[in-house]
Amino acid sequence: MIYSDKTTEQELRRGGYKLTTQRRAIIGTIAGTQEHLTPAAIYERVHRKHPSIGLVTVYRTIDILAELGLICETHAGGSCRSYLMRRPSGHHHHLICSDCGRVVDFTDCDLEKLERRLAKETNFKINGHLLEFLGQCRECSRKQKEQSRLC
Amino acid sequence: MIYSDKTTEQELRRGGYKLTTQRRAIIGTIAGTQEHLTPAAIYERVHRKHPSIGLVTVYRTIDILAELGLICETHAGGSCRSYLMRRPSGHHHHLICSDCGRVVDFTDCDLEKLERRLAKETNFKINGHLLEFLGQCRECSRKQKEQSRLC
DNA sequence: ATCTAAATGAAAACGTTTTTCAATTAGCAA
DNA sequence: TTGCTAATTGAAAAACGTTTTCATTTAGAT
Ligand SMILES: [Mn+2]
Ligand SMILES: [Mn+2]
Ligand SMILES: [Zn+2]
Ligand SMILES: [Zn+2]
C-alpha cells in the first residue's frame, strides 16, 4: 500500500466514515493506477480480487471520495464521469491522452485574469471553472509514428 | 423562424442530409431558446408541438448536428450532455449560470501560451481543450439577494 | 464481549441511449 | 407530375449506467 492510500483512508475517517474492507479495496484500486477509471472499470478491478464486493458499493464509495475531494472527476473521452486519485491537493486541472487515457495534472491554470474580465463583461458572479486539455502523450505519438512507418 | 435556423438547415443539406419536418422541428427548438437542453428536454418541447416525433429521432438528429458542429455540448451542471445552438461559429467556450442554466459564449480563451508550455513540459501533442466557467448570472444573484432580504 | 448506527449486497426500479426492423418519405430522375 | 430508391422515421426491445429499497452484516465505540 502506497502513501496516498494511507492519507486517503485517514481523510475518510476524519470525514466521519467507517473504514471498511470494501472501501480500502476501492481506494487501493484507484490509487494503484495512473489512468482514470469509470465506475464500471473500478468495479471490475476490485471485483477480481474481492468477488463479493458489489457495484453499488463502488458507486457509494466514489460519491464519498468525491465529496471529500479525494478523487478527481474527468469528462473527456466520450464516456461521462471517470475518476482518479487526487494527486495535487488543491485546485488543479488535467491533461489527458485521448489514446491511452494517461492523465497529467497541472496546477497553474492562470485563468484569474480571464475570469475577472468575463465577470465584469457579463455581470456573472463566477465561482468555478472546468478546464481540460486533450492530446496525445509522448508514448502514444511514438507508437503512432512507428505504425505509420510500417505502411 | 429566425436566421440561425435557416443557416443550420442549409448546413444540414450541404452535409448530405435530408431536410425533414422532424429535423426542422428539432433545430427550431434548440435555436428557440437561450438555455442548453438535454436530449430529453428537447424531446419534451418538440413533442408538445409534434406529438408524433419520437425520442429516437431527437437523438439521431443531435448526433448529426453535433457531427456537423452546428450545436455545442456542455458538461457542467450534473447531468451529462446538454446542447445549445452554436452561436459564434468558431472556437469558443461557455459561461454557465448554475441556477438558471443561461449560457454566455466567449471566444478569446487565450490558452495558447499555457498550451505551449504544457506541451513542452509534458511532451504531449495537444489538440484541444475543454473550458467552462460556472457561476451565477446577474438576474439570479439579484433574485437571491431579494430572497435573503425577506428572511 | 456487547451494542448500535453505519455500511453492505442482491434485486428491482429507474432514466438514458442504442439497436432492430418494418413502414414512411424526401429528393431525384424520368 | 409521377414514380423510384435510399434515407429517414417510430415503436419496441435491448442495452447501459445509476439509484433505491431492504434485510443482513459489520466497524467502532462502550
Ligand atoms: Mn487530478
Ligand atoms: Mn456555444
Ligand atoms: Zn497516451
Ligand atoms: Zn441565472
Image (cartoon, coloured by chain):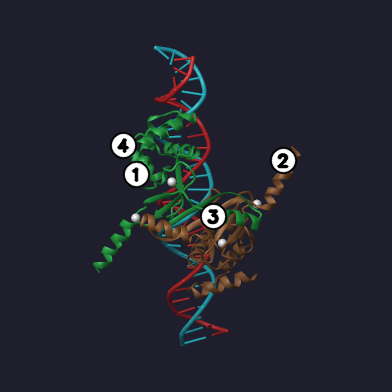
Chain colours: A green, B brown, C cyan, D red
The residue singled out by tag 4 in the image is A49
* Residue B7 on image: x %, y %: 58, 72
Q: Write down the residue under mark 1.
A: A33
Residue lying farthest to the left in this orientation: A150
> How many marks overall?
4
User: Subunit of mark 1?
Assistant: A
Q: Which residue is mark 3?
A: B132
The quarter in which the N terminus of chain A is drawn is top left
Tag 1: Cα neighbours inside 10 Å, few (<14), some, or many (≥20)? Answer: few
Residue sitting nearer the eye, A102 or D18: A102
Q: Does A83 sit above or below residue B81?
A: above
Q: Residue at x 58, y 54 (%)?
A: A115
| Among the 4 quarters of the image, the one containing residue A12 | top left
Alpha carbons under labels 1 and 2: distance apart: 46 Å
Mark 1 → mark 3, Cα distance in angstroms: 28 Å
Q: Determine whether D23 is above or below B97 in the image.
A: above
* Tags 1 and 4 touching, CB below 8 Å: no
Residue B43 seen anywhere in this rendered image of the structure = no
Give the amino acid at mark 1: Thr
Q: Is mark 4 within 8 Å of ligand 1?
A: no
**Given the image, on which type of amino acid does mark 2 rest?**
Ser
Chain letter for mark 4: A
Spot occupied by residue B57 in the image (x, y as percentages of width and height): 52, 62
User: Could you confirm whether marks 1 and 2 are on the same chain?
Assistant: no
Left or right: A10 with respect to A100?
Answer: right
